Amino acid sequence: MIVSIADNIISPLGMTSEENYEAVKAGRSALHRYEDLWNLPEAFTASLMDRETVEDAFAALPVEKEYTFFEKIVLLSASRAIKRAGIDPSSERVLFILSTTKGNVFLLDKRETGFPQERVLLGVAARQMTDYFHNPNAPIVVSNACISGVCAQIEAIRNLQSGHYDYVVVAGADMQSAFIVSGFQSFKALSPESCKPFDAQRCGLNLGEAAATVVLARRDTVTENDWVLCRGAIRNDANHISGPSRTGEGSYRALKVALGSMNPDRIAFINAHGTATLYNDEMESIAIERAGLAQVSVNAMKGYYGHTMGAAGVLESILSMCAIDDHNILATKGFDTLGVSHPLLLSNQNQTTEKKAFIKLLSGFGGCNAALLFAKGVEL
Amino acid sequence: MIQHFVHITPEFAFVDGKALNHNEKGAALLTELYRAHIGDYPKFFKMDTLSKLGFVASELLLQAEGELRFEPREDRAVVLFNRSASLQADTNFQATIQDPENFFPSPAAFVYTLANIVTGEIAIRNKYYGETSFIVLERQQPQVMAQQALAAFLDPMTESLISGWLDCEDENHFEAAIFLLKKGQYDNAETVSKEITKIFNIKY
């Protein structure tokens, strides 16, 4: 069995998983409106890290070289999770997987001159992380658009199952920049205000930045407090490179594999992608119903953090584990009136639960979708 | 051994170790190959170079396999590796936002700024509902590629895999070295790694 033994979230809402969970439980959102930032002609709403807070926290790490902001949040999150896990990151039995979509892409801007151009390469950025921890293995970067964070955990599960490694550190992160914001603006995908997942008035997503890390390990037996990563799957819509499938094809198929033969009654909630774009949320409602999960509660975190891209799959999995530890189904912030054609059980209030399992669902450009089943204290 | 493999660079194109005739080099070679061997998929012309490379290479690979095409299936995965992610598309998109006086970010350019788009292009063309993944490495590492490719068979439905190297720095610097792998064909990464190394280093 594959279990999560430690985690961390670095975000505008806190520097530990607990701080983040408590902030979200209290209904705090990190979304703010930014005008004239990064020379962008259009204002946007996003969840951005305070640079100074990150610098202060980073100053406590023993470093010998210069790191980019992106690398700093990765190192901060990974080092805190590793410390908690109590593992030796320099062991050849430890594999590092980085989940990111754009890494140091800001370095392509000709005005950025402080770092060698090669750091824009994701493998080179990931090497900063393994070098920092003196890890001898080649770092693996999972770059599968918005589903990267779940794909990276699925990769980790497989690498542990195959026995090549004893521990896998999965760090997910993305920083925002003019590159990403203007790209999503050109797509008309951004909401000018805080996003409204699954709501009738939803009009687009917000972007966010964060780093989140889980440390996974293989176990022969599990205790009641262990979080087990039971099953995951990645499936393609085979439909369109930027538009979600109208039949929810890939998400439906990924959900079916993640669910396996288990009874859906055991699932506390599906933590959906819920970007609050018209088409994504509609697609998810179709996929969830097709998978026979319409009676399971659904929530989404984008109203607190925006879309944190490469971090999202890891961050949202951690928050969901924290929520079940607290017998809670987190509220979907920004949601008010159901605005998808297939009825889903959503709430903008926290709700109690005694159930011990959840499914993390994601979808992304390239038609990719991923689902991963987590269960506490038992393999389902 | 690996039966079907395709190796394309700006200078040559080989299928299962046999050279394809061509006159062009660089990105023009991909268009020439498309016209000579494919020709029925105009979406090709909208793609960025990485996707064109992946599309042409996968078409040639699947033609070599010779099985029934375009039937919906969930048992075939596409797991590709490279070094540059979507660097060429990134550089092109950056050029559209570099100058504040001439700021024109294009959605058509932005969509290709993700390495995994090419896996979606291959899935769409072939109606593959199976797993699609893109993994970025620091350099060509056959051992790592072999390990991660074999790991994909731990999915309960995956029976075969289009995998390999698919890298594009720009229109004149790219390399596809992709192959078909079947479940159970190899049980250890060491053997697959040797096969991958052979494909990279084959002397034509």
Image (cartoon, coloured by chain):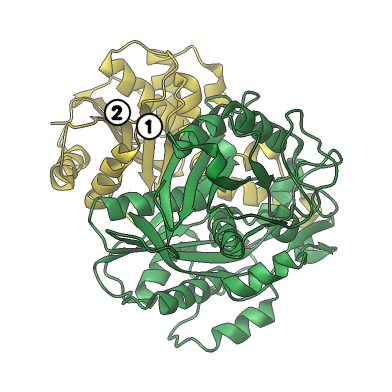
Chain colours: A green, B yellow
Residue B89 visible in the displayed image: no
Residue A115 percent across, percent down from the top left? 52, 72
Quadrant containing the N terminus of chain A in the rendered view: bottom left
Residue A174 percent across, percent down from the top left? 58, 60
Residue positioned 80% across, 54% down in the render: B101
On the image, numbered disc 1 is attached to which residue? Answer: B77
A76 relative to A307, above or below: below
A287 relative to A352, above or below: above
Residue A62 is left or right of residue A309, and the answer is left
Residue positioned 36% across, 25% down in the render: B75
Circle 2: is it few (<14), some (14-19), or many (20+) Cα within 10 Å? many
Q: Front-most of B87 and A228?
A: A228
Q: Which chain's residue wears label 2?
A: B
Specify whether disc 1 shares its chain with disc 2: yes
Residue positioned 68% across, 50% down in the render: A300
Q: Which chain's residue wears label 1?
A: B
Circle 1: is it few (<14), some (14-19), or many (20+) Cα within 10 Å? many
**Mark 1 or 2, nearer chain start:** 1
Residue B98 percent across, percent down from the top left? 69, 55
Q: Front-most of B5 and A5?
A: A5
- In the image, what residue type sits under mark 1? Ala
On the image, numbered disc 2 is attached to which residue? Answer: B160
Q: Dots 1 and 2: beta carbons under 8 Å?
A: yes
- Residue A86 is labelled as none
- In the image, what residue type sits under mark 2? Ser
